[in-house]
Image (spheres, rainbow, N blue to C red):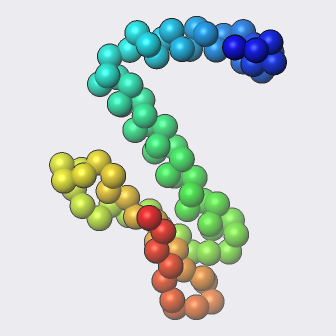
Amino acid sequence: MTSRDEDVCGGDAKGVEEILRNMKAAERTLEGFMCKNVVDMGRPVWLKEHGLAAELVKYVPSSVSPENRLLVASQTNLQSKLLFF
């Protein structure tokens, strides 16, 4: 790690790496899904802030696929739908 990385991370980046290395795979997976939820929730918010109607929908049960979200957006003045995977 460079000194710049230490400055940006407050010198704790190695500590984070150590924590991740010591986590069980299931815990890392859960953390990953939680992070993905944060990102996924922000996507429709961004679209709405830029004048689109947007909705995040689950299109299959989680038991079929954990990657089961579809972002559906449309222009507010048009009826055409845009699909983002």
Q: Residue 46: horizontal and vertical position, in percent? A: 64, 60
Q: Quadrant of the C terminus?
A: bottom left
Query: Which residue is most to the left?
Result: 63
* Front-most of residues 5 and 10: 5
**Could you tell me which residue is drawn at 56 percent across and 75 percent down?**
53
Q: Residue 50: horizontal and vertical position, in percent? A: 70, 69
- Total numbered circles: 0
**Could you tell me which residue is drawn at 52 percent across and 91 percent down?**
79
Q: Where, by quadrant of the figure, is residue 28 drawn?
A: top left
Q: Quadrant of the N terminus?
A: top right
Residue 30 horizontal side relative to residue 5, left or right: left
**Could you tell me which residue is drawn at 62 percent across and 75 percent down?**
52
For residue 80, above or below residue 34: below
For residue 77, above or below residue 49: below
Residue 17 horizontal side relative to residue 77, left or right: left
Q: Residue 56: horizontal and vertical position, in percent? A: 44, 62
Residue 49 horizontal side relative to residue 33, left or right: right
For residue 29, above or below residue 45: above
Query: Which residue is most to the front?
Result: 2
* Front-most of residues 27 and 17: 17
Q: Residue 40: horizontal and vertical position, in percent? A: 50, 52
For residue 26, above or below residue 1: below
